[in-house]
Amino acid sequence: MEFSTINPWNLQPIETFNNHTDDEANSIIEAVDSTYHQWKKTPFEERASLLIKVGEVLLKNKQTYADHITEEMGKPISESLAEVEKCAWVCKFYAENAAKFLTPKIVETDASKSFVRYDPLGVIYAIMPWNFPFWQVLRFAAPTLMAGNTALLKHAPNVTRCAMDIEDAFKEAGYPENAFRTLVLTNDQASAVIKHPKVRAVSLTGSERAGEAVASTAGSVLKPSLLELGGSNAVIVLEDADIDAAVDTGFRARFLNSGQSCIAGKRFLIADEIHDEYVEKFLKRVESLIFNDPTDATTKIGPLARVDLAEGIEKQVNASLEKGAVLKTGGERDGAQYDATVLTNVTPGMAAFDDELFGPVAPFIRIKDFDEAIKLSNQSSFGLGVTICTGNVDAALERVHEFEEGAVFINELVKSDPRLPFGGIKRSGFGRELGIEGILEFVNAKSVYVK
């Protein structure tokens, strides 16, 4: 089947691709499995050397790769360049730390010797989204390959050139040809790959609907899965916060990647005493955002990645307005472009509170105190992260355990970092990427006992 990628800025076709046939996909899976049986024997030093080279390839070609990111999904070019640079960082991190993370662990028992060793599983299958088309893939691939597994990628169709770029980067770095391969598939084909006997586990970053489908399919064939799904992160601003710093944190948390991030700040819970001042200062920042060609280095906000995504945000905002939310700025759509939007008077029961807003919309909710902030933050089906802006860090730390989230960031926006585990609870998914936890997701923790 043939399809074309579309530039969301001008809605013009970019490039035409063909899906792999079932036979082609099976041949690739078999080749990746065959390579695994050799790759798992490769010493850590050699694996690390190759992963460092991937980082070098990424930096050498970063302008080309960033251009493709921006062209395919509309991210401002400055952010696309930063994304590629971050991918080089995760390569360096796992190249330097994987051997330490996977060192066999001595355990004292009644044996003369007992320990746990960490062995690779085999072919690991990744189904990845379009919003960070390089970062989402590299943060999966770096630990997975360093652990001795091989990898398959099924990327979102609208970023197929990015998927090809990533495969080429591994090849240019000197990896075996079938250590990392891209599959261009329909959704039905993608599901079938999970059931392939040579595929040992699956990692998905995507929507709740996709997560339900992948977990169900993987469970039906008793294969492990890692799900990194949506989020509706609260940005809590308490009355003792530095307002200017909190405005800056909230603004960056909401509008990075034009609002298209699972860990973006999506519900603003502001102390009543400072609510109006915060909103006023936030509005000034928002009204400075001007849509422009995302290839322009000065552009700070671009279109959403597809027209249907902008239409979805439009419906959520309109539904919230019908229930009593107040539009302070924005609210207009033109093709895939949706204006940076601020809503006040938002309450539970509105789409702007209950649903994930995957775009540049900031809903504001008044809170009486920290108790109410925690209650409303947890009043979500998601559990990915929360930001707390406060002048009393110690008091906030004492209550971190009350948040039903995978991450709590104090006086900073929630962000992914190779050194820290990343993931959520509830309908934000399960499992962890990054950190030592990320590399342990797809290994066999094998107990060894010697009498």
Image (cartoon, rainbow, N blue to C red):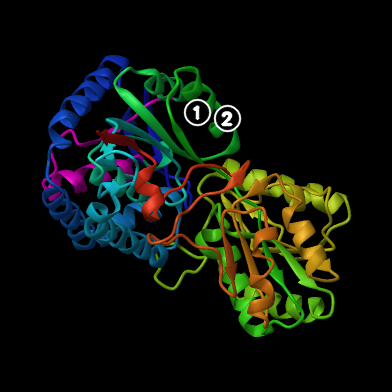
Crowding at dot 2, Cα within 10 Å, few <14 / some 14-19 / many 20+, comes out as some
Residue 111 or 126: which is nearer the viewer?
111
Residue at (33, 52) in percent of width and height: 68
Residue 366 percent across, percent down from the top left: 83, 68
Which residue bears the numbered disc 1? 214
Q: Is residue 133 visible?
A: no
Say the numbered circle drawn on residue 80: none
Q: Amino acid at mark 1?
A: Val
Q: Secondary structure at mark 1?
A: helix
Residue 166 percent across, percent down from the top left: 27, 46
21 relative to 181, above or below: above
Q: From mark 1 to mark 2, how far is it between C-alphas?
A: 6 Å
Residue 442 or 287: which is nearer the viewer?
442
**How many tags in the picture?**
2
Direction right: furthest residue: 324
Crowding at dot 1, Cα within 10 Å, few <14 / some 14-19 / many 20+, comes out as many
Residue at (26, 43) in percent of width and height: 147
Which residue bears the numbered disc 2? 212
